[in-house]
Amino acid sequence: MQAHSVRLLTLALCTSGFLAAQPVDDTVAKQVIIFGRHTVRTPILPNAALDYFAVQPYPDFSVSGVAVMTPNGAKNELILGAYFRQWLIHEGLLTGHDPADANFVYVRANNPPLIFQTAQQFVLGLLPGANVPVDSYTAPANDPLFSPVAAGVATLDYPTAVAAVNGRLGGNPQTLSTAYSAELALTRSVLFGYPVGQNPPPPAPPEKKDVVNEPIAISAGDSTLPVSISGLSDVVAAIDPFVMEYADGLPLSKVGWGQLNAGSISQIDRLYDVLLDLEFRTPYLDAVQSSNLASHITRTMVQAVTGTSLGGALGTPSSKVVMIAASNINIVGVAGLFHLDWLLPTYQPDVSAPSGALVFELRQSQSTGAYIVRASYVTQTMDQLRTQTALTLEKPPAIAPVFIPGCSVSNATFDCPFWTFVQLEQQVVDRHSVDLIH
């Protein structure tokens, strides 16, 4: 007991010394890049297709259509934009005078309506008194920032891509069924409406597709999704509605037909997470698909530091706030290139949540003049989305500081010397997959 007390006292003394030794943050924000995912939406498949996977019909949302922003999703994005408005005014990058501030804000969005409208809602919350244009390619053109292979900027070798994914699975994709057996068992029980512990589990109902027991195979895809993971992709299509049902505020009786809560949805979503990881964080695929976006993000900060217009940068040298609206695949990919990780309440590790954003702050020391990069991941929790919780500086969304391997120092916010970050980007980015014009 005495030894235990001595250890606690020693730990307390060491901890207090560590806290006291932390340097005062004398940095000021010079630019912030908010790299966010679209907001809450309807499922990616129509109910007519989804109903083939389950014994009960999937519930309807308050708006019809596939992958369409819901009214509650629009409101949540507005709430998030309003939070960033408060924070950016506090940081001195916005003044609160919207027409003047609009001159220093640049917004780029991928062209699907869901993503474009998400950006519009964010800006409406950020600068409600100004009209800020959203820069975007007109469909069906592919934006090289978000779809570099389809746009012809990057070239992917499909056999190598398939081999790279297979190589991460020991050449046997079926091992995923064992590694994620608990998540698959829970998914099947929800889809077919029986207790998860039932043994043996019942057979698939007639006329229904048993997606959980489909064989998993890796094959070449197309320029939009270069690797196809059959079997697992059907499972993800079947579970995709659950997080949106909960986040959109559907009655709990309709969330997984009354069988799921935030915790069990998060567990099931591990299947979605591993699919994204294989498709977009596999190193070869990641370098080809995410280098152009990572390069644009870095060059945007270089442009702000040097004050000189730079090809391959977003906005102008005077842009203080840059908002990039994209999909989870883009955020997962850039995070994979830099080996970034985060963990926040109600989500699994490294989840790119609806409306969540990877944030890069360019800051400058007032004492030395040196620039740093400070990264964080910011997202509304599932319950904040569900209840449309108002966000303030005192009651913010969930925020995690993000460590940048090979760059961050050991302070509380994992600051990264700016020019070290630039050197790191040069190491991780595939120059053959970068377009410095668009």
Image (cartoon, rainbow, N blue to C red):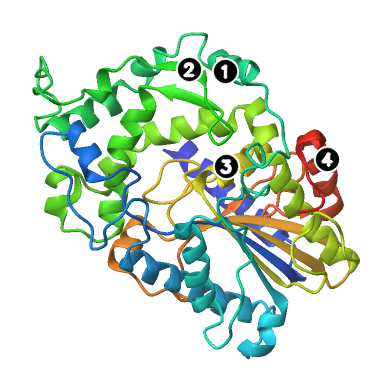
Name the mark nearer the viewer: 3 or 4: 4
User: Which comes before the other along the chain, label 3 or label 4?
Assistant: 3
Name the mark nearer the viewer: 3 or 2: 2
Residue 348: x percent and y percent?
A: 42, 41
Q: Are marks 2 and 4 in contact (CB under 8 Å)?
A: no
CA–CA distance in space, label 4 to label 1: 26 Å
- Please tell me which residue is depicted at 28% across the width and 36% down the height of the picture: 238
- Please tell me which residue is depicted at 55% across the width and 29% down the height of the picture: 222
Badge 4 density bin: few <14, some 14–19, many ≥20, Cα 10 Å: some
User: Which comes before the other along the chain, label 3 or label 2?
Assistant: 2
Helix, strand or loop for disc 3: loop
Residue 275: x percent and y percent?
A: 45, 30
Say if residue 132 shows up in the picture: yes
CA–CA distance in space, label 3 to label 2: 26 Å
User: Which comes before the other along the chain, label 1 or label 3?
Assistant: 1
Residue of label 4:
426
Amino acid type of the residue tagged 4 in the rendering = Gln
Helix, strand or loop for disc 1: helix
Amino acid type of the residue tagged 3 in the rendering = Asp
Please state if 44 lies on the left or on the right of 60 as rendered.
right
Residue of label 3:
341
Helix, strand or loop for disc 4: helix
Badge 2 density bin: few <14, some 14–19, many ≥20, Cα 10 Å: some
Q: Which mark is residue 91?
A: none
